[in-house]
Image: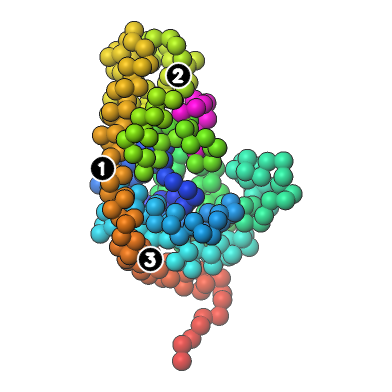
Amino acid sequence: MSVYQRVLSGVRPTGHIHLGNYLGAIRNWVRMAKNTTEQLFCIVDQHAITADEDPKNLAHNTRIIAAAYIACGIDPNKSAIFTQSHVPAHTELAWYLNCFAPLGWLNRMTQFKDKAGKNSDRANLSLYAYPVLMAADILIYKASHVPVGEDQKQHVELVRDLASVFNKHVNYKLFPLPEPIIPKETARIMSLRDGLSKMSKSDLSDYSRIHLLDDADTIALKIRKAKTDSDPIPGTAKELNNRPEALNLLGIYAALSDQTIESLCADFEGQTFSSVKKALTQVLISSLTPIREKMLFLLQNPNEIDKILYKGSETANTLAEKNLKEIRDALGLLPRIDR
């Protein structure tokens, strides 16, 4: 099994955190801890404002992500949990990297095209330069590995390219080239209303996702309303290939219960989705209720969250400032001398 040196992970604080974030990312980060020397968990609030985040909600949403990290099993005594904006080195390094980022590279980033759509001429600079700040988030800590989904692989490739061109400019290997961690088998959680679209915070329908703060009644209602089809459960997973909503619900069940979809098909073969939904509801409630309760406890004590974030930022700043000094020296910037 691989052992990772320094792993950096992050989530944008844009609204509630949902089941897809948990099963697709955070749970994997927790499980990686035993094979990782050092883990840094960032809440990337400066990335959030690229999407016109309401200033009234941003601080609260940041605390929600911190609470979710802890409630899902990340130990703040072993890993640094911190806020991006509390470590100024992120944005300073982003500017230095901007000086080495060809426009052609940024023009190829598919996420900008997806988010800007037909209004790319009116998109703001921060959305366009988002991948460079993401590169700075990673390189400022000289992270060795970055857990990402398949759709984020392009961003890590850009990070590696920027690190390489920077290293070439300063004529030595200042930055390691971080490796993406893309689990071979990871839960890909889709919308409860559309089995072909990922579960997302941006979906207009709240019935498309399950939030980690949803109570038992809300979970039960959302699963009852989840889109399925009228066919019975087949005996093999292969027979679900053209049934995306059915595959999604069984995939969620399999991920939460640490079973395979194949074994669930064998268990439920010939039954309708009403029986699957009842069983899935119970698994969801039993799995998410402890997380919800711990999150609510933490959110009722925001000062405790802030203390954890402060402690994490101290750890992150110490490491970032050390690396930033080396970066400034490599660029030939005049050192600031205290008198």
At label 1, counting other C-alpha atoms closer than 10 Å, the crowd grade (few under 14, some 14-19, many 20 or more) is some
Local secondary structure at mark 3:
helix
Residues rendered magenta in the picture:
192-200
Q: Earlier in the sequence, mark 2 or mark 3?
A: 2
Going by the image, does 71 lie left or right of 42?
left
Q: Measured along the vertical axis of the image, is residue 311 above or below residue 287?
A: below
Mark-to-mark CA distance, 2 and 3: 45 Å
Which residue corresponds to the image point at 52% horizontal and 35% vertical from the top-left? 205
Residue 83 in picture, x, y percent from top left: 42, 61
Q: Is residue 135 visible?
A: no
Magenta-span inclusion, residue 298: no
Q: Earlier in the sequence, mark 3 or mark 1?
A: 1
Amino acid on which the number 2 mark rests in the picture: Thr
Q: Earlier in the sequence, mark 1 or mark 2?
A: 2
The residue pinned by badge 3 equals 313
Amino acid on which the number 3 mark rests in the picture: Ser
Which residue corresponds to the image point at 56% horizontal and 49% vertical from the top-left? 158
Residue 290, numbered label: 1
Name the magenta segment's main secondary structure: loop
Amino acid on which the number 1 mark rests in the picture: Pro
Quadrant position of residue 31 = top left
